Amino acid sequence: MNLSLTGSRHQLINQLVYFDEELHQFLELYFPSPTKSRTYTEERLQEYSEALTGLISEFSEELLHSKVLIGSKVQIRYLEDNESDTYSIVFPSKTDPSSNRISFLSPIGSHLLLGTREQTFTIQTPSGEYSVRIEDIRYMNAGDV
C-alpha cells in the first residue's frame, strides 16, 4: 500500500475511533437539546461509522473514492442550470466557505455524506431547493478530527 493510501486509511481509522469514543460529546456540542436534527445526525453518524468499518476492512483506492467521506473533495452538478461546484467535506471546526470547505452538518454536506458518483438528489438549503448530481469524489485526507 502506498504512503498516501496508508495516510488516508490512518485518517479514516482516527475518524472511526473519534466517533466511537466522542459521539456523545460531539452531539452535545452541536445539538445540546434533544431535537429531530440531533437524532438524525446521530443516526447518520452511526451509518457513517458502519460504512467506515466496511471500507477499512476491505481498503482499496477504488473504495476510498467510491463514497463521500469526511475529507472527500466532491464535484457536484446543479441540474437546473448545469453549473458545477466542488466542495471539501470537513468537520464543523474546519469549515471555510471561502475555500468551499463545508461541514458534514451543513445542508449540502449532510446530503453529500456517503453519497456515490452519479447519485442524484434534492438539497434543501435556506436559499432554496436544488437538484444535484455527484460528478466526482476524491478522498483528499483532509477530514481532520
Image: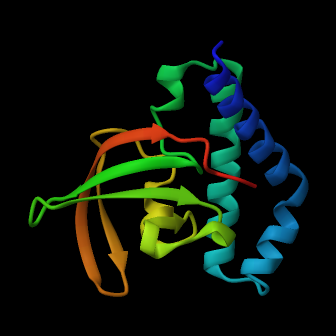
Residue depicted at x 86% and y 67%: 24
> Where is residue 144 shown, x and y percent of the image?
70, 53
> Where is residue 9 shown, x and y percent of the image?
69, 29
Q: Quadrant of residue 39?
A: bottom right
In the picture as drawn, the residue positioned furthest to the top comes out as 1
Q: Foreground: 9 or 44?
A: 9
Residue depicted at x 62% and y 37%: 51
> Where is residue 107 shown, x and y percent of the image?
45, 73
Q: Quadrant of residue 116?
A: top left
- Judged left or right of residue 77, residue 74 is right
Residue depicted at x 40% and y 40%: 137
> In the rendered image of this protein, does residue 83 appear above or below residue 141?
below
Q: Foreground: 25 or 46?
A: 25
State the scheme by which the image is colored. rainbow
- Judged left or right of residue 86, residue 77 is left
> Where is residue 128 shown, x and y percent of the image?
27, 83
On-image quarter of the C terminus: bottom right
> In the rendered image of this protein, does residue 17 appear above or below residue 8?
below
In the picture as drawn, the residue positioned furthest to the left comes out as 81
In the picture as drawn, the residue positioned furthest to the right comes out as 21
On-image quarter of the N terminus: top right
Residue depicted at x 59% and y 51%: 70
> In the rendered image of this protein, does residue 13 appear above or below residue 128?
above
Number of marks in picture: 0
